[in-house]
Image (cartoon, helix red, strand yellow):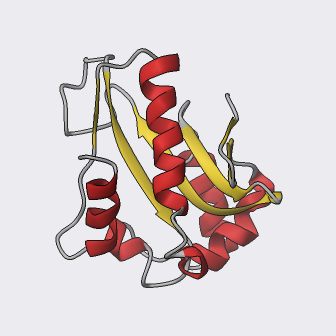
Amino acid sequence: MTTLQTERLVLRPWRESDAETLYEYAKNPNIGPAAGWPPHKNVEDSLGVIRNVFNGPEDYAIALASDSDTAIGAIALTLAGGSTLFPEDDATQAELGFWIGEPFWGHGYIPEAARELLRHAFEDLGLSAVWCAYYEGNTKSARVQQKLGF
């Protein structure tokens, strides 16, 4: 899997060693429910997510460039068969999804990470479209999508 970098961030594959940090952010009830998933209950729950959910070819842990070993959020392109936003057999499209730990809100990290992942989607993967959606009431995701031109 590719590792992507921006001025302040590294987008890298998830590692099983990220489970404790993932749990610290994903147990927060302000994170998961706004993105459509329940708060994590324990480190084992987070490890299961790393093994079974964050295991796609375009699933990335977001880390600060100054500490690339510590995941602070997630960003992904869901490809053909994994999204309801486009036909399941269409390999030219993807769905963008993201979240970041609450201590990192308001720093512009998600728009920065998403811009790099969108660049990767169109330039490196040759996709023709990327879709994005948010759950009603998730104003933070709506604002990020506005900043990205969705």
Foreground residue, 112 or 139? 112
Occupied quadrant, residue 98:
bottom left
Side of 13 where 142 appears, left or right: left
Residue at 36% x, 19% y is 127
Residue 56 rendering spot, x and y as whole percentages:
53, 35
The residue sitting at 22% across, 65% down in the picture is 135
Q: Which of 137 and 44 is in front in this view?
A: 137
Image check: 111 left or right of 88? Answer: right
Picture quarter with the N terminus: top right
Nearer-the-camera pick, 32 or 111: 111
User: What is the residue that sits farthest to the bottom in this orientation?
Assistant: 29
x%, y% of residue 94?
34, 31
User: Which residue shows up at 54% across the image and 49% down it?
Assistant: 113
Residue 53 seen in the current view:
no
Do we see residue 97 in this rendering? yes
Measuring 29% from the left and 19% from the top, which residue is drawn there?
128
How many marks do you count on the picture?
A: 0
Question: Is 79 on the left or on the right of 135, as rendered?
Answer: right
Q: Can you tell which quarter of the image residue 88 is in?
A: top left
Above-or-below relation of 34 to 55: below
Indicate the position of residue 38 as horizontal and vertical percent values.
41, 73
